[in-house]
Amino acid sequence: MTSVELDLAYAPMSEVAKLIERKSVTPLDVTTKLLERIERLNPLIAAYYTVFADSALAEAAKATEEIASGGYRGGMHGVPVAVKDICETGLTTGGSKSRATNVATSDATVVTKLREAGAVMMGKLATYEFALGTPTKSSYFPPARNAWNTDYDPGGSSSGSGAAIASGLAYAAIGTDTGGSIRWPAFANGIVGMKATYGRVSRAGIFPLSWNLDHAGPMTRTVADAAVMLQAIAGEDARDVTTAPGPVPDFSAKLGTSIAGMKLGVPWALIERCDPEILALFKAALEQYADLGAIIVDVDTFTHTQVMAAHMPMMAADAASYHLPQFRSAPEDLSPYLRAMVGAGLAVSAVQYLDCQRAREVIRKQIISKFSEIDAYILPTSGVAVPKILDAPGNLAELAGDGFVVYTGIFNLTGMPAMSIPCGFSAAGMPVALQLAGRPFDEATVFQLGDAYEKATRWHEMHPEL
């Protein structure tokens, strides 16, 4: 591969879009090269379950013709993207043996919106089973691998989305997030992942995990790319009654503006059991923000343990509600982990579920009340590094125990926008990230803060050598 082709593979979506708009390259050129790269690297990374080679080339050819005739639609027109395989379009497996041959009869709203924006749909990306069951080497579908070290998991549950961006196999991807499944793989792969406000992005046509906690959103190489992709997929949808009415704001409006004087709140009580190396990199990021003029303040919040006590039973019960028919009819087609989670969800009583909902509201009100003092929260995305890919299934303790400390679920409970951005590398050469969270429906400020740090540090320019 030439250096030009390699640079294009790892270029931010916005740079590729500029080349396409200027007619320096065509969507067909970009798509053809990307398909060649996928053919070469996907056997190693396993980011894609299904590649839509023929339809992608047809869509790219159509976009090339439209742009040549003056019909350029904007920053996603002709750009190759991919979606997590719980989003309905074509073969949609959910990463589960139980739906290995399931072909969607309609498209998820996020897919429809991406196509309306002119994006080229490259295929379906690997996922933890139904966005929950951790894949292993013995799983029915092979696990996606971390491009920085293929012995390691790329984080989940949007594992293929993270791996595809990190390895230069897509310019943008859709992930979903119930407790951190956009932001944790963003942490693990050294990319950007934005969980927008609950109700900002339609979940219609996406296999649910928790109706209360599920979000969909962009995973990209840069903050600016995430803002552009969110612009394309956000908005009210009659197919999803939880979507917010009204016009969609310009998510890119504050990019490139000063953050001097803005107050960032650090919820130290939440940052339990954080790996010392991750904590040191986070503290260095705080110093960088201070150098940019931000004011760092401490804020009181709940602990990670308290948050998970409300989050996990609710998520498990919601998952059990959705998967109960399959659990009863053919449990052998579900992984041991997913069966265990459904069993745990069935054990949640109505009283416990209501207690979790009450606790959620207390947490939400306290967290949002702090915006009278701060402009955004800042904290590590995760307190632990991603593990090596396991040979065989583990147990619920992997995702619910004391050893799994990912500081993301609180913003699923509150519904606030939260974004993970790279903030360095461990001594082992693996990415580390911080997380920013803002007021409900104020994604623009989160993007502003992330963009300022990204431009000052350039961590997003690092990529694996593939």
Image (spheres, grey):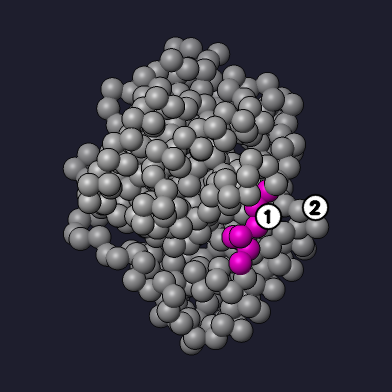
Instruction: Give the Cα separation between the discs numbered 2 and 1.
Output: 9 Å
Residue at 35% x, 44% y is 78
In front here: 247 or 45? 45
Work out which quarter of the rendered image holds the N terminus and state it.
top right
Question: Circle 1: is it few (<14), some (14-19), or many (20+) Cα within 10 Å?
Answer: many
Is the C terminus in the top left, top right, bottom left or bottom right quadrant?
Answer: top right
181, above or below 431, in the image: above
Q: Position of residue 33 (x, y in %)?
A: 51, 37
Q: Is residue 393 left or right of residue 254?
A: right
The residue that label 2 is drawn on is 428
Disc 1 designates what residue? 431
Q: Is residue 461 magenta?
A: yes
- Indicate which disc residue 377 carries: none
Magenta stretch, residue numbers? 458-464
Question: Which quadrant of the figure has residue 375?
Answer: bottom left
How far across and down, in percent of the image, does residue 199 sit? Answer: 31, 52
Residue drawn at (36%, 66%) of the image: 252
